[in-house]
Image (tube, rainbow, N blue to C red):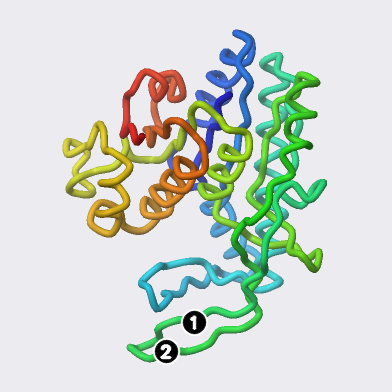
Amino acid sequence: MIVVKAGGGEGLDMEAVCADVAELVQQGEQVVLVHGGSHETNVISEQLGHPPRFVTSVSGHVSRYTDREMLEIFAMVAAGRINKLLVERLQQLGVDALGLSGLDGRLLEGKRKSALCIIVNGKRKILRGEYSGKIEQVNVGLLRTLLAAGYVPVVAPLAISYESEALNVDGDRAAAAIGAALKAQKMIILSNVPGLLRDFPDESTLIPHIPLAVAQEHLDRYAQGRMKRKLLGAIEALHDGVEQVVIADGRVAQPVHRALAGYGTVIQ
């Protein structure tokens, strides 16, 4: 069992990702593909006159503020356009892919974070109307049913709250929750860098292997921005039952096979 997370930033070769997933499935491997949608959401939200707003939490974490309008734009882009184009391509490659989001069948469920505590000009402020959350439950029975029937789930990073509201959730941590629920042997996180870098953005400073304990201890030192969320996802996945996580380059040919061969940052 392999969970592949293809990031939502610019530069990933999604054609190569789909080709790799198709080859693995044709070899008898069970695969779940989780994808992002941040870059395309930014572009389309600008075009629609509702540009993205990014805020900084008291802990220094930068995230998108997801009001209801932004949530609907994100759902349209991620669960609509991106998800269905990936399903289309996998079907063209002979894979019986099935696209869904965490809303469908309550696949990903958690508590809504309706307000954010943020820092503005050095002062704390409360920002309300947020539609994001952290995944607390995975409908693993649904995934196992789909996998047993020969489908490849392609999952968009939306979840559902306990009050049945749609939520925007982090794609890396969604993949981690799915990987942990399925007790996946490996989770591959594909990004637009070759892995965890000792001196970002110098790609020659790739860290090829890092023990879980070191990754936890030096989270802030080794990871900033999006990479911090990827490393958090890796740590959560390993804590909850995934055997190995590889953060790897999604811009190259055969990105999944390269990651499985250890090219990237291996964490275990």
> Residue 31: percent from the left, percent from the top?
61, 25
According to the image, label 1 marks what residue? Answer: 117
Give the residue type at disc 2.
Arg
According to the image, label 2 marks what residue? Answer: 124
> Residue 147: percent from the left, percent from the top?
73, 25
> Residue 53: percent from the left, percent from the top?
51, 72
Give the residue type at disc 1.
Cys
Q: Is residue 158 above or below residue 6?
A: below
The one nearer the camera, 144 or 18, is: 144
Quick one: which residue is furthest to the top in this view?
27
Please give left or right for residue 173 compared with residue 112 in the image. Answer: left
The one nearer the camera, 158 or 54, is: 158
Are the residues flagged by discs 2 and 1 in contact, CB closer than 8 Å?
yes
Q: Is residue 215 above or below residue 142?
A: below
Residue shown at 17% from the left, 48% from the top: 199
Q: Splitting the image into 4 quarters, where does residue 229 fall? A: bottom left
Closer to the N terminus: mark 2 or mark 1? Answer: 1
